Image (cartoon, rainbow, N blue to C red):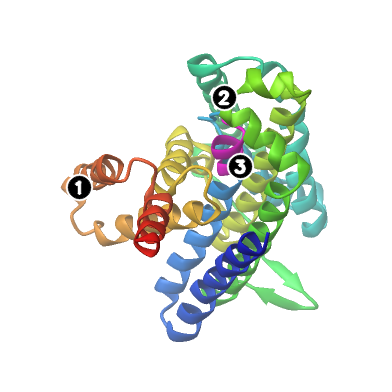
Amino acid sequence: MSRLLSSRYAALMFVALVVIVPGLMLNSSFYLRVGALIFIFGFAALGLNLLMGYAGQVSLGHAGFIGIGAYATAVLPTHFGWNIFAAMAAGVAGAGLIAYIVGGPILRLKGHYLAVATLALGILISMVISNEVKYTGGPDGMAVPRLEVFGFRLRTAQHWYWISGGVLFLGIVAAQNLIESPTGRALRALHDSEVAAGTLGIDAARYKLIAFVVSAVYAAISGVCFALLNGHITPDSASFLRSVELVTMVVIGGMGSILGALVGAALLGLLEQLLAQFHEVETLILGLVMMAVMIFMRDGIVPTLQRLLFSRRAS
């Protein structure tokens, strides 16, 4: 128990340092924006990791929930006069409700059938966003109202660096509490063996649905932050490629690792920025780096490093 608590607080301390130290050292709006994007998509990857790494369920359409959160934040205040805080809450609640409604039948599927079903869900959401030109602006996207708190407008990269960093920290705390709860133990049992979990009286359908809804809420919150950071959104936020990026972050960082989601998001985000000048071969180099990571670190970066560290201590 003491080892569990110490590892938990060590992870939180590490995340706090990752947020605070660069935030105090960086003065460039560009680098602060890159950091904010890493935190935002790391948050979405964290939610997806709860579904993939703990419940053992794959989702190839998770960016659709990012789109729901982002577009609710833009559409409801712009076209219906909603308060922006109410719109943000509605986007998150709407994503959770949709995940609850469709999750029941979808999660009855297994393997590649489940992957195709979640892919279809993500594509459907993206198509709705792209085709409802009257409300969403279609492929060109739409502007997002700026967030104001007590008359202070939050619009700079520095503002959203600290906000997204704080949201990520709270998301990690919530994820750790969930994992260490009876629900988390049930999810781990499902991941190891759904049949064995069933013999222990665990309702597989119920707990898989819980993981799906929680991961959708994480994605929607990420979408809200992404929309407010950018001030403008397009259907790309809910695209299939965005979903693939989230899955890649989870797999590279390490499934079943809380820190793995953040490490995966940081690696992918930084590589995209570093390789931007090599536009013609950017995708090729990025693919080779990912292949190398998966060949030499099959469990992901964080679990592999943890295993190496513990083996050295043991010796």
Residue placed most toward the observer, 250 or 4: 4
Q: Which residues are magenta?
A: 49-56
Residue 121 drawn above or below residue 77: above
Which numbered tag is attached to residue 285? 1
Local secondary structure at mark 1: helix
Query: What type is the residue that disc 2 sits on?
Result: Thr
Query: What type is the residue that disc 1 sits on?
Result: Ile
Disc 3 marks which residue? Answer: 50
Which numbered tag is attached to residue 118? 2
**Among the 4 quarters of the image, the one containing residue 153:** bottom right
Residue placed most toward the observer, 9 or 242: 9
- Is residue 145 found left or right of 82 in the rendered image? left
Quarter the N terminus occupies? bottom right
Residue 94 appears at what percent x and percent y? 76, 38
Q: Are marks 1 and 2 in contact (CB under 8 Å)?
A: no
Residue 44 appears at what percent x and percent y? 57, 48
Residue 230 drawn above or below residue 301: below
Residue 114 appears at what percent x and percent y? 56, 19
Q: Earlier in the sequence, mark 3 or mark 1?
A: 3
Q: Earlier in the sequence, mark 3 or mark 2?
A: 3
Seen at 31% across and 46% down, the residue is 297
Whole-Å distance between the Cαs marked 3 and 1?
29 Å
Quarter the C terminus occupies? bottom left
Circle 3 residues within 10 Å: few <14, some 14–19, many ≥20: many
Give the overall secondary structure of the magenta segment: helix
Residue placed most toward the observer, 48 or 129: 48
Local secondary structure at mark 2: helix
Q: Earlier in the sequence, mark 1 or mark 2?
A: 2
41 drawn magenta: no
Residue 131 drawn above or below residue 306: above
55 drawn magenta: yes
Which numbered tag is attached to residue 75? none
